[in-house]
Image (tube, rainbow, N blue to C red):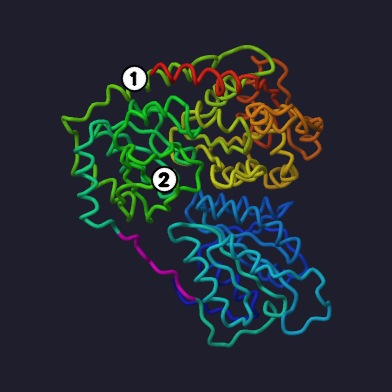
Amino acid sequence: MAKDQRPVGNGAKLFIRALENEGVKYIFAVPGEENLAFLDALRNSSIELVLNRHEQAAGFMAATYGRLTGQVGVCLSTLGPGATNLVTAAAYAQLGGMPMMMISGQKPIKSSKQGLFQILDVVDLMRPLTKYTRQISNANTIPAKVREAFRLASEERPGAVHLELPEDIAAEQPARDTHIFQPSDARRPSASRKSLEMACDMLREARHPLIMIGAGANRKRVSQALLHLVNVTGIPFFTTQMGKGVVDERHPGYLGNAALSAGDFVHCAIDRADLVINVGHDVVEKPPFFMTPGGKKVIHVNFSAADVDPVYFPQHEVVGDIANSVEYLAEHCGQCANHDFSGLMKVKKAVDAHLQERAEDGRFPVIPQRIVHDVRQVMPDDGIIALDNGMYKLWFARNYPAYDNNTVLLDNALASMGAGLPSGMMAAMLYPHLKVMAVCGDGGFMMNSQELETAVRLKLNLVVLIINDSAYGMIKWKQAQEGYADYGLDYGNPDFVTYAQSYGARGHRVNRTEDLRPTLESALAEGGVHLVEVPVDYSENRRVFDEELAELTCRL
């Protein structure tokens, strides 16, 4: 990159130049008076300001930008309450492995006449939620701190970073010789030959090996290497929730998704396996299965060593670039005559049959299987769905086949409600040529529903599907599971159609099951922002998850 010949200006302008140098395209923001110098510097920048209606949504959009691109997403808040509103998004990015930078304002630190008004130690607040958090106390240090923050946010394991820019430092003039630091071209190290050979030996010795694909594989797009591995070895595979789509789930070796930690069809396959190769697994996800002492062997293949806990303690680790490791296994293992997948494929047959049951059930309100089926039918192969958090997330993880990387955006790390709409908005911004749908429960949608105005203002093409049960449905299911009385989880909702129209979006209410698919098809085809409300019958939760699975899986 050519040397930037512009005058240094003030600290805010230097900060913007450092962000431009990192390739930042958007800043998602709810600015305050402490950000005014920064905002003015941004006015003449190549970086686009996206004005949000809540800091949490700005953070969710920045984190999703990081998830989808691998580049650092950037969001901005003012001090005090603005900064505290970023806390949930910080945890979302940190646990989810999404590279994101938060910038917060602060009162002047060299002289202030406002006492402790709105003053919090935001740097200390962010410390347990980020990989790096610093207050900038000298304008000359801005380029170094920005470069270090971006380096750490992007490095494996990716996550959140935070910089605080006080008002007086933003206005301060840096030294004339202050310069911008260029990003380095660091490569991820490869695993050692010894660890790879040991993994090959374990794979050759196994009788019933199985591959699990986790979130780390989705981050770095190692699809081709994994597809090569499953094709040349014939080893069946399953995914965690955040590993969906790394390999096309129409593949004949796909056994299903570990949406539950135990007791599902896929766990029958896991129980039959004597070796599980965990590719990209991260213990921040709800455990896809439980290890037990003396049980099956597990190989951990990831960018970093395993975080051992009581239910995850792999016997061997292959630490290094995932794609290189997987490619080595594919090239040096191949098919083994002693491998026997007949028991695993028996499970696949049962899974496939189970997932087709009631997929076209016509009862109303609509059951989850039909909702998932109709969404899959209307979404093209490269269409993206962004799931909020609720009971429907389990149904989509199990029943919705993903055909490509990051075409199912769900969060199984922090699992925060309120993320579905902002995540869908970010996908629609990045990929205006693709069909994008945010799938939200009524509870999660209302946590950031004000961002409908942002979506309309940005002229996005986005369908928002609201699955309405007028309750916190997943917690009601858990309440019933544990034998508690039905209490405290029901609420009222606005008229969602009128609500959408008040923001300038199109609103639709599904009143018959057979209308769901054509309503979604029409909304996707028309473009613009559409909200589609569908009532759900969650009685299937108990029938399938609490009764049917226990009965059917014990027969396999």
Residue type marked 2: Tyr
Q: Which numbered circle lies on residue 87?
A: none
Reading the image, the residue beneath label 1 is: 346
Residue type marked 1: Lys
Residue at the spot 60% in from the left edge and 58% down from the top edge? 26
Range drawn in magenta: 181-189
Furthest residue in direction top, as rendered? 362
Which quadrant of the figure contains the C terminus?
top left
Residue 164 at what x, y percent from top left?
A: 65, 71
Q: CA distance from mark 2 to mark 1?
A: 26 Å
Residue 148 against residue 207 in the figure, above or below? below
Furthest residue in direction bottom, as rendered? 176
Residue 513 at what x, y percent from top left?
A: 66, 16
Q: Main secondary structure of the magenta part?
A: loop
Q: In terms of sequence position, does the residue under pointer 2 or pointer 1 come before the other? A: 2
Reading the image, the residue beneath label 2 is: 312
Q: Is residue 554 magenta?
A: no
Pointer 1 local density, CA inside 10 Å: few below 14, some 14–19, many at least 20: some
Residue 310 at what x, y percent from top left?
A: 45, 46
Pointer 2 local density, CA inside 10 Å: few below 14, some 14–19, many at least 20: some
Label 1: state its secondary structure: helix
Residue at the spot 45% in from the left edge and 37% down from the top edge? 288
Judge by depth and name the residue closer to the eye, 53 or 23.
Answer: 53
Which quadrant of the figure contains the N terminus?
bottom left
